[in-house]
Amino acid sequence: MSTAFEELTNRAAGRWQELTDGAEPWIRVGGGVSGQAAGSDEIFTSVLESLDRFDVSARVSRVGSLGLMYLEPIVDVTLPGGSRVFYGNVTKDIANQIIERHAGGGSPVTSRAFAFEGEKTGGLEGVPRLEDLPEFRAQVRIATRNCGRIDPYDILQYAAHGGYSALEKALFRMTPEQALDEVKASGLRGRGGAAFPTGVKWSFLAPSKAPDKYVLCNCEEGDPGAFNDKGILESDPHTLIEGMILNGYATNSNYGYVFIRHGHDIPIEATRHAVGQAYEHGLLGKNILGSGFSFDLEVALTGDSYVAGEETALMEAIEGKRSLPRYKPPFPAAAGLWQKPSNINNVKTLAYVPQIVFNGGKWFKSIGTESSAGTAIVCLTGHIKRPGMYEVPMGMSIREVLEQVGGGVSPGKRIKVLQTGGPLGGVLGDESFDVKIDFDEMSKAGAILGSGGIIVGNETVDVVDLIRALVAFNQYESCGKCFPCRLGNTHMLETLDRLCKYEAKPADLKLMDRIGESMKLGSLCGHGQLGYNPVASALKYFEEEFRVRLRVTQPEGKSTNGSMILPTRTRP
Amino acid sequence: MPDNISFTIDGQEVTGKPGQTVLQAAMDSGLYIPYLCYFPKMKPYGACRACVVQTEMGERKSIVASCTTPIAPGLVVDSKTEQVTDLRRGIIELLMAEHPHGCLTCHRVELCGPQDICQRHVSVTDRCTICPKNERCELKDTVRSVELDLRTPLNYHRRNLPIHTDDPFYDRDYNLCIVCARCVRVCEEVRFDNAITLTNRSGVALVGTSRGESLLESGCEFCGACIDVCPTGALVERDYKWEKAARQVTTICTNCPVGCQMVAEVNRFNKVVRFIGDLAGESNNGQACWKGKFAYDYPNHKSRLKYPYVREGGILKRVTWEQALDRIAAGFGDRDGSKVAVIASPRGSNEDNYVAQKFARSVLKTDNVDTALNLTPRVASTLQKRFGSAGSTNPIWDLEGSKCVMVVSGNPTEEQNVLAVPLKKAARAGAHVIVIDPRETELTRYASDWIRPKPGTEHILLVGMARTIIDEALEHKEYVSSRCSGIDELKRSLWKFDLSAVSRVTGVEDTIIREVARNFAKKAPASILFGVDTVPVDLHGALTDAILNLSLITGNVGVKSGGVFPLYAGANTLGSLDAGCSPMAERGTDLTVEPGLNGATPPPMRDGVADLFAGMRSGEIEAAIVMADGMNPGAGPLGDAASALRSLDFLVVSAVFDDEVTAAADVVLPASTYTEQTGTLTNLERRVQLIRTAWTPRNEERSGWQTFASLARRMEAEGFDFQDSGGVFEELASVVPGYAGLSHDRLEAGGIQTPCPSSDSPGAAMLHAEEPDDDAGRLAIVPLPFIGAAAPSSDLVLAPGRVLSQPDKPVQVTRRGDMNYLHRVEVVKVHEEDAKAMSLMEGDAVEALDDHGSRLAVGVASLGSPQPGLISVTTLFAEVALGMHDADSPDPSPRIPGLPLQPVRLVKAADLAAYAVSSD
């Protein structure tokens, strides 16, 4: 073991000891985008005020998100040597109570606590263990293992949880080939949408002898309803950094970029800070931990563009150009960023890598299904009881996820439609809810797992309106380069508008099919090729709803464009 | 060279070159696959998807865009399957739903022809007449080729955008734009200007300017490349916008020595209505410039001179050619050869110039013959003497591959525009660009090293560089020892060029000189483009010697992508030198008047056209024949040419238009233009190219050689019985050795670079490519004297600069009438010492006045001139473009102002607001 790394782990253990078993209680306030949206900034301030008011001394940290977004803002308290007790939906009043009674007084506010973790201590009667919560019981947390647990701004907390030990293992006890073999053996497939085997992708780049090779990480994540990439970066950016260094090591590449969409401020700041820390600790830069391997990492941002998440458009954006997709071939492994050999992966994909290298590819392969190893990080939103970010093993059925993890819909309602994999994914109807979460099974059912977003709609959702909203998004976000996507989306949206306004003609369904076919076969990149998915899948499961719009006239009181009015960019 | 690749398209065996795409290979094989966004000589883009085909490789079938799919052995391409044709129609159908297409739905689609008059059968908003490209529209042809059913259920949408007609030269109608981005790409990847860009995205994506609204402020160089690539009527030339071509004539642009091959579109009334860069042109690769693209139409002008005139009683009276020739013969009478001169046209063909000099020498018995733009005879003669040709050593497009390009005292972007295109391409590819010029020009933007020596010390700076290279042993020793002679003499001469002395004289720090020298020596191949814009005339030879030495010691002559490129003015300066149309002795062909001719000792030879004009001013020259086509009659590089000509006793002018020059003439002859004659031009890369007749003269215009030949015959000289210009060229080729292998017939197939000694010689793309066989063939390096470093005068010199855009300086675009104009406050850069001397503060309003008190520049003073005595002002190129656009002259391009250095006085201006410079 390198002495530098030993020193890091020793300091990390000391830091964790100090935090959990030091002189003062440790209060963690859940942050991240979801926490912030629920008001965690105010709660954080009020926690500090309460500490002053009750003259309690405690350490206060902001951590990322546990994934239980329906409970945000979450505050938890760990007394020295004691268990960690979680409080959900915290208000200022509750925060006051927590500080006064738990942090100050030493006794948990049982009525407000939803779970605890660690050794059960007194005063926690009736409070379940975190891992016993139904939404936690079903989870296998690999990539999100540290989310909500550690302060993303503290590299030592990451190291205290085994962070960078996979890197140390690879650098000192594995050749790049061995590291690559572990990733290959793990059966890991890309979590960005295309589900391409990651190890195979890396092995396209690895043999290139070019002096400058790039590994890139894609956190454009513009899908409505998807927040797991951001979730990982804002909660545990070092996992990604470690994954990227390993990616560089396994493919003999010395440069990396994390590409984050401009405006995702919390993940951007967290990642930038983490990159800086990694440099300070000799985990990035020249001669990492004295191993002789060098790797430089930079955070790059794009403007407001969904298509910038397409791998080649992303490279254009990093190069400072308009983010338009390139044609392929040449593929990135031959000529990517700056026309140099490159590899690009999604945040989630790379976040698995440290654990895969550390525990071995076989271990990962044993989780999930035969063709889809590991876990799926799903984002549940919409008409569901427990919206949040959950990491479940592949092979669970969607229904299981919705009911066990998501808690189902409100009583008296039923789930009617699911929208999965982002706006280019598609919709699923009732009959396919039993499909397993698995790349191949889902694509057979006409939807994609994609980014892992699942938007749940109950019976009040009008599918035609929903599809119109999705197509409006796709149309708005088309880069405008290739004709089928630029024009096809526009005409598709106009046709759907006619349907929504009850003004369509029967031939319009056929017209959409014709437009969709041109987009699917003719488009330059995935944005256009998949652009017909929402309509095609909706016609598969909900054709009758479309036909009704053709038959009847506009009902009284029914808005014409559905509930969602989105901006459009149709005509110059 | 890897083998060609065989594959099949639609069952037909096709071979293509490695690296080609399916579409390129298909085009080369004469197979048509519809396409819209692809354009030859540009990178594939893959946006329109009209070129979709089905490919089959082993088991794998896929539908791909043929423009981006590389060919592979055994690939099976099918462009006509039902799925593919249906998909293609589906995509173009989407396109047509936003492109006006009355031209396609009209039942007269087959009958409709150029300038057809018809009852329009389509609705007003969609009718063919909103589009200037009817019958020459690439989109229309493509749509028709896919046999699209236009009864589409898609909603047709008319954009109703305003048409941009307020910038010079271009009309931009984005209602017709299909967003194929050809224009944006040609501007970015071929011209490197980035003046236009895609705006917005998705359905509202369109083309617009990079900054603001007007092309004036966007960095546009008005080269027209975007127009030439536009497949629709969205971008068109404003002039003759609605004119249809009856025929196309391949010809050569006569505005500068690049010699761009152009396609002239001629309508059925014999007017050139468009000038399009010819993709097959080897000198320009399809490119053109603002002059070539928009200043070609003077032959069309209604005010052209049609008949000969003789001045009687102060008034020009129309006469017959015979009467005019009689008058000329009488006017010259038996004047002494030293007292007459022949000034040939800078646009004149080799044939014109050959006959002009033959006339001068054999009839007028004088060596006083030159073209009006042969302003740098010492550059030409030095090159001729040392390298055997006054042309560039390398072809123009060789510059693409240079790793280092040095530009000395020249402004190719404006003066030899297309020459700058491969230069910029090299710069984009990472070449090191060195600009040595006190003026800020377009190329200084690309310069890694921009050196601004005191004007007139450029040659000393260059020798200083040579000194550094020798001192640090950076010269290419092997090259020098195997190919050159005289290195020791050079070394011995360099002791005078101590870098501290060089630094003192040039005003450039010695560390910088060393750095630049190292950069130039280490980055091979390196090429040098050099003009003498800022160099006094007596130093032209010294500068050329310094340049050639530098290129030789670094081993760059006769090397691909190396070499030297002299930046001449005048379209046929090199050809006229080759044809002997110059007083100089060193020109390859010795046609000088021999002693004893005319019974007298010939006078000492005059030093080029400037000296001839000096002779006119001093009265030594009394009579002259001037071919005025393409000459700047106003205050140009020859001073006030018209006033010099007025002082003559007898003046014959052959001109296209009535102007200041004809006003001074005793006899005026109507000249034909490039459209009315066949002839050859030799560009600066020694390429002899054919100008072709577009129409026969309408009236009594005669070309230069015809004029001289008929005059010679009238004066009873022998040897002027030429049948046609081909016959003239035949005689020329028999006299000029480098032209021996050339003939009009041979040049029909394309230009050939001289020397071309025999009819089976392919010409010489590069000079001195071979190692010399013997010592006589070695290239001489010459020792250099330390001259021209006179004590600095206390005068201030204005170095006017011009660039395409200055994004950091605010520009206001104002509208007057229908046009946009620029309005901004210029920055006058003054050296600290000079500012102190006249107690000038940063931000003061100042004016620069010339000897006569005319204001040359005005603006706010800013400290930061690199040299004491040097004042610099950088204006925007758009002002010149506007000037040309608004010019009254039917032939504005010869009058476009260059960027000469001028002595000035600097005075404080009272109120800056009053002086805000405006292009109105």
Image (cartoon, helix red, strand yellow):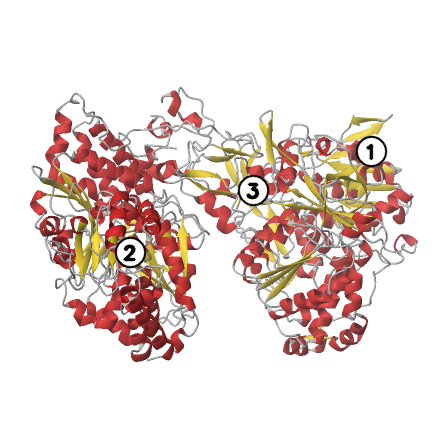
Q: Residue at x 66, y 35 (%)?
A: B883
Subunit that carries the residue with mark 3: B
A349, above or below B620, in the image = below
How far apart, in angstroms, are the residues tagged by discs 2 and 3?
58 Å
Indicate the secondary structure of the residue bearing disc 3: loop
- Give the letter of the chain under mark 1: B
Judging depth in this view, the residue of B386 and B234 nearest the camera is B234
- At label 3, counting other C-alpha atoms closer than 10 Å, the crowd grade (few under 14, some 14-19, many 20 or more) is many
Amino acid type, mark 3: Cys
| Viewer can see residue B714 | no
Kind of residue sitting beneath label 1: Ala
Front position among marks 1 and 2: 2
**C-alpha gap between disc 1 and disc 3:** 39 Å
- Residue A14 position within the rendered picture, expressed as x and y whole percent measured from the top left: 32, 71
Residue B597 quadrant = bottom right
What percent of the width, then of the height, locates residue B94? 30, 36
- What residue is shown with label 1? B664
Tell me the number on the disc at residue A28.
Answer: 2
| Residue sitting at the far top | B119
Q: Give the residue drawn at x 53%, y 49%.
A: B191
Q: Determine the secondary structure under disc 1.
A: loop
Task: Work out whether disc 1 and disc 2 sit on a shared chain.
Answer: no
Answer whether labels 1 and 3 touch (C-beta < 8 Å): no
How packed is label 1: few (under 14 Cα within 10 Å), some, or many (20 or more)? many
Which residue is identified by label 3? B220
Residue B138 visible (yes or no): yes
- Along the line of sight, the residue nearer the viewer: A83 or A492: A83
Q: Residue at x 79, y 70 (%)?
A: B497
Which one is in front, A504 or B714? A504
Callout 1–callout 2 Cβ contact below 8 Å: no
Dot 2: element = strand
